[in-house]
Amino acid sequence: MTPAATPLTGDARILLPPAIQKDAVIYVRALVAHPMYTGMSRDEQGALIPEYYIKTVDVTYGGHRVARFQWTSGISRDPYVAFPLRATHEGPLHVAWTDTKGRVYTQTAAIAFGG
């Protein structure tokens, strides 16, 4: 495995239920493509691969922070997070993943009622 970022690094997705009702508790699933190197693995030549992982995940709903996750290097490749959210209003749900190199990967999905 090469320490360079894969072409898909940063490909973020948010998965919402197909139908959302006002005031319902929904389960949000979000994931991002990322190699999540711990700093303890080696490349093909035996050299240590430096730490490179997602360290924070910030979630906003309608412009207000509703969750923040702080991670360590112990999270697996292509991390995934799931959490409940009460859908009180229609608006954007935004997830921002920040890695140890300061890169930020974002995705936004619309919370809309109906279906």
Image (cartoon, grey):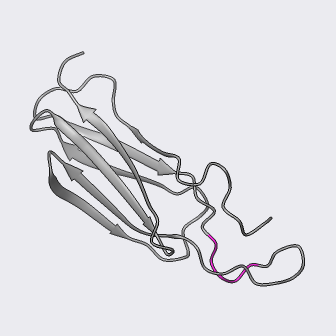
Q: Could you tell me which residue is drawn at 50 percent across and 52 percent down? A: 32
**Residues drawn in magenta:** 37-41
Above or below 99: residue 13: above
Residue drawn 58% across the image and 73% down it = 52
In the depicted structure, whether residue 61 falls above or below residue 100: above
| Displayed quadrant of residue 48 | bottom right
Could you tell me which quadrant the C terminus lies in?
A: top left
Query: Residue 54 at what x, y percent from top left?
Result: 48, 67
Taking the image as shown, residue 55 lies to the left or right of residue 52, namely left
Image position, residue 47 (x, y; %): 82, 84
Query: Residue 44 in the image: x percent, y percent?
Result: 88, 73
Question: Considering depth in this image, is 55 or 2 the residue closer to the camera?
Answer: 2
Indicate whether 48 appears above or below 53. below
Using residue 101 as the reference point, say whether residue 42 is left or right of it.
right
Q: Which of the 4 quarters of the picture holds residue 89?
A: top left
Residue closest to the far right: 45
Q: Position of residue 21 (x, y in %)?
A: 16, 26
In-image side of 68 versus 114 (left or right): right
Looking at the figure, which quarter contains the N terminus?
bottom right
Dominant SS of magenta comes to loop
Image quarter of residue 93:
top left
The number of callouts visible is 0
